[in-house]
Image (spheres, helix red, strand yellow):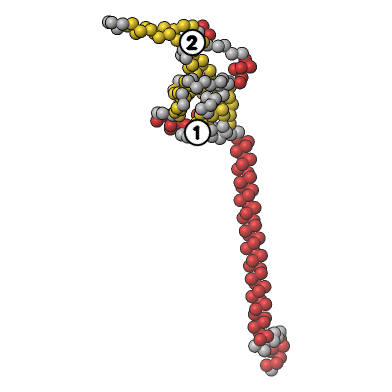
Amino acid sequence: MIIRELDSGLYRLRIISSSSMNENVFIVAVYGVSAAERDKMKKKSVEKESVTLDPAVIKKQNDSMKWYFNDSLIAEITGDQNKICSDDECKERFRDRLKLDHQTGSLTIMNTRTTDSGEYKLENNRSRISIIKIFSVIVTAVPDSVAAVVVVVVVVVVLLVAIAAVIYYRHRKSTQERQNDTMDHSHDQGNGVDSVPLSEWHSINR
């Protein structure tokens, strides 16, 4: 854990039994990275966006590649097979938000959340050589200013819809009233009844 360049070298595993001894040899190479390279491995994202961790290596057919998030295995490529989130904790955390490129070994985190921030480690095993790359991911929340603008836009849209509804209602009501007046006038004329001022009506009755 927390590897350094000084950890590079030859590692031997000896398995000794009463009748035999087997030995496995591993070569570990830890490469230092420049400041520019470290900046490339720092991935920044805003919530809901996607971020891709690209190992920038040529993957060979028999390579074994494992991705870890804070030392927990989250994705794996072995030969032609690949796995994403084999345990419940990983499935709960990432839930269909991880995409693994079988050709390049790159890992994409979709619809990012602030809880996705942390250290992602790629362990690339080819033959007896292990190459490890570490990526630092920082996911920030949506800025308050952006959220405020969204709220204002929604409020304005709602107000415009309400105003349009009121104007439409008044226009429709006014149109119906004019239609009713026209119908009443036509009905009076059809019955032979003329409109007479009230003062003249009293004079006629006298």
- Badge 2: residue crowd in 10 Å (few <14, some 14–19, many ≥20): some
The extreme front residue here reads: 61
As drawn, 8 above or below 106: above
Q: Quadrant of residue 16?
A: top left
Q: CA distance from mark 2 to mark 1?
A: 32 Å
As drawn, 164 above or below 75: below
- What residue did someone put label 2 on? 28
- What residue did someone put label 1 on? 97
Looking at the picture, how far across and down is residue 202, in whole percent?
Answer: 69, 89
Q: Name the residue type under label 2.
A: Val
Looking at the picture, how far across and down is residue 73, in whole percent?
Answer: 44, 23
As drawn, 22 above or below 177: above
Q: Name the residue type under label 1.
A: Arg
Residue 75 visible to the viewer = no
Looking at the picture, how far across and down is residue 78, in whole percent?
Answer: 45, 23
* Residue 145 numbered tag: none
Q: Secondary structure at mark 1?
A: loop
Residue 156 horizontal side relative to residue 69, left or right? right
Q: Residue at x 54, y 34 (%)?
A: 111
Q: Residue at x 56, y 28 (%)?
A: 52
Query: Which mark sits nearer the N-terminus, 2 or 1?
Result: 2
Q: Nearer the viewer, mark 2 or mark 1?
A: 2
The extreme left residue here reads: 18
Q: Quadrant of residue 87?
A: top left
Residue 112 horizontal side relative to residue 83, left or right? right
